[in-house]
Amino acid sequence: MSKAPLLQVQGLTLLATGSRRVLVDALDFEMGSGEILAIVGESGSGKTMAARAVLGLMPPGVACGSGRILMEGEDLLQARPERMRALRGERIGMVFQEPMVSLNPAMRIGDQLSEGLRLHTSLTDAQIRQRCLAMLARVRIRDPERCMAAYPHEFSGGMRQRIMLASVMLLKPRLLIADEPTTALDTLSQGEVLDLMTELAREQGTAVLLITHNLALVSRYAQRVVVMQRGVLMEAGAVRDVFERPRHDYTRQLLGAVPQRSRAGIHAGLGAPLIEARNLSVAYPGAGKGWWKRAQPRQVLDSVNLAVHAGETVAVVGGSGSGKTTLGRAMLRLAPHAGGELHFQGEVVGRKNLQSLRMACQLVFQDPYSSLNPRQRIGDIALEPLLRVPGLSAAERSYRVDEVLAEVGLEGFAHRLPHELSGGQRQRVAIARAIVRRPAFVVADEPVSALDMTIQAQVLALFQSLQKQHGFACLFISHDLPAVAQVADRIVVMEAGRIVEQGPRDEVLDRPQHAYTRALLAAAPLPLE
């Protein structure tokens, strides 16, 4: 690190103005030009709040109690609002967690890219346009001209994050704050976005403050790391030193929560399949091309063959748009079939036995906050799947709800509402709702992608324990390869609506046959041994 630090945070204390609760407590760290420093910790550790304080963008109800934030010797906490507006973008840039929220959906990409250049430079419109086109090409947008005229919704999550990165780096800031920049992205997009970010930072001499709960990304991209818990700095130092010789129990807890490959599964291929897709295809209506031209359907699944056996966990992996979620929904008959057959317990699923399929299958959604009714209490949410089970009395239903809440570690939570629970607890409710009817088949769609590392480890361990106890089969949809390595018996790799490779977990991870599988594994941030 250079002798004169680019950024110095000294004794920073942030408070909730109403309760005077300490959110960040006497935080100290510094970073030099061109350095990548990561701040890690669980949700609620104060890492995002500290980063926002650097930009002067603390939310209402949060105030600075004491401390200094020095940017090249200038105290940002003492800067006037107009000075901070001049610094934002030109000297300090920020890439937010969700690009669809941080990009204006009503503005064209070109207008959003050029906004900062118009505010902070004296370039002509032609010069601004040329610089924007060059930066879009630099972040590997295939058609920069078309991109300039398009809107954010026309791009995938990975493309939107590239555009967001381009808009920030156009001004060549001295400091880039990246707040969970890859949480919503698949493995390939994660690697591409972070590789681009580090390349651009290196080219322009920009320092990067990386806010994340993903230790795998830290190990690959950062030079130094700061570990925070409940607003307090627990440990700081070079990444290799902290990860190989952690001094604090909390750091060891975070490192212990990284998913590890479990022993080889024992269920793969045993007996007749519980559920099987044969040449299954799904197509959605395409966009119309005129008044008289009929829209061509868009193929989402193309002749997919997949069998899942009782008690087995089959993981489906692939990039965004590969058809993973559509396959899971199609196997529950929640997506319209354009071709092929679905067999359940040896019978073709049709109108006559569709109800029996639905009664024997359940779905765990990716985001528990949006999939739980905010007006229903936890006990009522867990009770709902039992209302159509014949032969159960009210007392038996109540006993089953209490039993399943105890199984997922939420005993005594029946009268709470979803907003009173943490993210991990809400996901436990979603799992309880899925298993309360003792299903034969569960589709888990990205069940841990929104959780931090320690909560993710708890939920994965809980899921494995419940599967061992109740014996249900599981289709585990994920882009998190370390999590897949922990829970899967078999792995199915999808690309563009097709299965390009499938087989036992260890065989796919250790001896991948398809180029796309090898690309996914190369992009995984941690080795999967």
Image: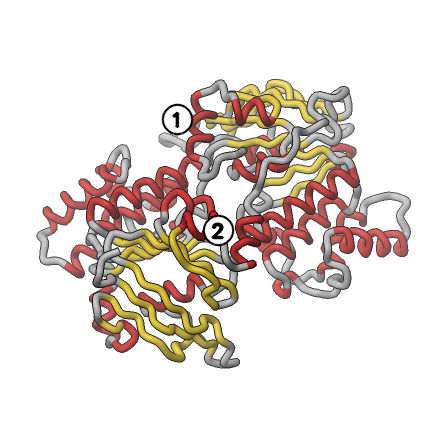
Residue 461 vs 273, above or below: the answer is below
Disc 2 is placed on an element classified as loop
- Give the label on residue 98, or none: none
Residue 324 vs 240, above or below: the answer is above
**Which residue lies under the disc numbered 2?**
245
Image coordinates for residue 448, horizontal then vertical, percent = 58, 46
Residue at x 25%, y 45% (from the top left corner): 200
* Contact, mark 2 vs mark 1 (Cβ under 8 Å): no
Type of the residue with mark 1: Lys
Instruction: Check disc 1: other Cα within 10 Å, few if <14, some if 14-19, many if 20+.
Output: few
Q: Which one is in front, 84 or 354?
A: 84
Image coordinates for residue 361, horizontal then vertical, percent = 72, 37
- Mark in the foreground, 2 or 1: 2
Question: Could you tell me which quadrant the C terminus lies in?
Answer: top right
Disc 1 is placed on an element classified as loop
Residue at x 39%, y 66% (from the top left corner): 50
Q: Which one is in front, 524 or 351?
A: 524
Q: CA distance from mark 2 to mark 1?
A: 66 Å
Image coordinates for residue 95, horizontal then vertical, percent = 34, 53
Residue at x 73%, y 55% (from the top left corner): 409
* Left or right: 395 in relation to 72: right
Residue 312 sits in which quadrant? top right
Image coordinates for residue 9, horizontal then vertical, percent = 33, 68
Instruction: Check disc 2: other Cα within 10 Å, few if <14, some if 14-19, many if 20+.
Output: few
Question: Could you tell me which quadrant the N terminus lies in?
Answer: bottom left
* Left or right: 32 in relation to 422: left
**Which residue lies under the disc numbered 1?**
293
Residue 50 vs 310, above or below: the answer is below
Is residue 342 in view from this perspective?
Answer: no
Residue at x 48%, y 35% (from the top left corner): 527
Of the image marks 2 and 1, the number of the one nearer the N terminus: 2
* Left or right: 342 in relation to 469: left
